[in-house]
Image (cartoon, rainbow, N blue to C red):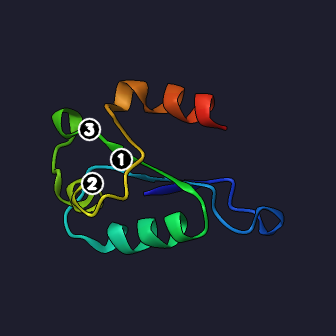
Amino acid sequence: MFNVGNHADHGGPRLHGGQTGMGSDGREGAAWIKAKGGTVFTEAEDSCVVYGMPRSVVEAGLSDGAFDLGHMVDAILEHV
């Protein structure tokens, strides 16, 4: 998991990413980010070693985009 733009003058994190991992704890963080008006990106299923955490975010309707790792940086740079 990562956050970009986590500054108090922006009201908290603006971009959150969910990558390969087990569990669903990232979903709670993603929901918090979305509630603050932020953006959530997840790793695409086809590039994940384990699709557990990104899946929980996607299935909750919290992902604003899913990207394989080779394109994640480009997506972030286009967003910020």
Which residue type does callout 1 highlight?
A: Thr
Which quarter of the rendering shows the C terminus?
top right
> Is 15 displayed left or right of 65 in the figure?
right
Judge depth for marks 3 and 2 and give the one in front.
Answer: 2
Q: Which residue, given by chain and number where applicable, does mark 3 sit on?
A: 44
Which residue type does callout 3 highlight?
A: Ala
> Would you identify the image quadrant in which residue 77 lies?
top right
Residue at 44% x, 33% y: name it: 72
Residue 58 - label: 2
Of pointers 3 and 2, the one earlier in the residue sequence:
3
Where residue 54 appears, as percent x and y from the top left, is: 27, 54
Tags 1 and 3 in contact by the CB under 8 Å rule? yes
SS for dot 1:
strand
Where residue 19 appears, as percent x and y from the top left, is: 33, 49
> Is 58 displayed left or right of 62 in the figure?
left
Q: Which residue, given by chain and number where applicable, does mark 1 sit on?
A: 42
Where residue 59 appears, as percent x and y from the top left, is: 21, 58
Residue at 27% x, 64% y: name it: 60
Mark pair 3, 2: CA separation: 10 Å
